[in-house]
Amino acid sequence: MAVAVGRQPMHVKKGDTVEVIAGKNRGKRGKVLKVFPKHSRIIVEGVNVVKRHAKPTPKLPQGGIVEKEAKIPASKVMLVCPKCGEAVRFGHDHLPDGTKVRVCRNCGEQIG
């Protein structure tokens, strides 16, 4: 009997600036390029760069060794507050029109 993996609520979104808090890339910051909620993983610009061998294609005529970002667990990153400039925890708040927004726990600034 297979167990179905549900969509996990993600604390980061595409376009957010995050800081890696664990692993070989600890301390690096980058922008979230892609989010995989089903597997709770993300791809961050300039983090966890791996080398892959590529065959020649019309897009890459010479082929060779290509460097690209690999997925990392979303639990290993923290959101960076645009005002504080620090990796922070965040809460949620409701605007007068009813929309839910993320708020920095340190300075109270709205994130994203």
Image (cartoon, helix red, strand yellow):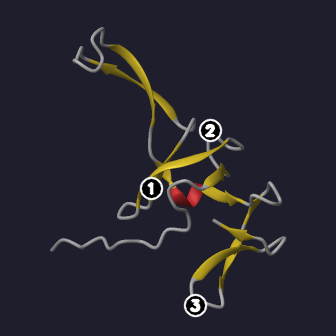
Q: Height in image: 6 above or below 28?
A: below
Query: Residue at (46%, 29%) from the top-left corner?
Result: 50
- SS assignment at label 1: strand
Closer-to-camera residue (16/79): 16
Q: Position of residue 46 (x, y in %)?
A: 57, 35
Q: Quick one: label 2, few (<14), some, or many (20+) residues within 10 Å?
A: few
The mark lying in front, picked from 1 and 2, is: 1
Q: Amino acid at mark 2?
A: Lys
Q: Which residue is mark 3?
A: 98
Q: Position of residue 85 (x, y in %)?
A: 80, 54
CB within 8 Å, label 3 to label 2: no
Picture disc at residue 65: none
- SS assignment at label 3: loop
Q: Which residue is mark 1?
A: 41
Picture disc at residue 24: 2
Query: Residue at (81%, 60%) from the top-left corner?
Result: 83
Image quarter where the N terminus lies is bottom left
Q: Height in image: 95 above or below 28?
A: below
Q: Quick one: label 1, few (<14), some, or many (20+) residues within 10 Å?
A: some
Q: Amino acid at mark 1?
A: Arg
The answer to which of marks 3 and 1 sits earlier in the sequence is 1
The answer to which of marks 1 and 2 sits earlier in the sequence is 2
The answer to which of marks 3 and 2 sits earlier in the sequence is 2
Q: CA distance from mark 1 to mark 2?
A: 16 Å
Query: Residue at (68%, 41%) from the top-left corner?
Result: 28
Q: Quadrant for residue 54, please give it.
A: top left
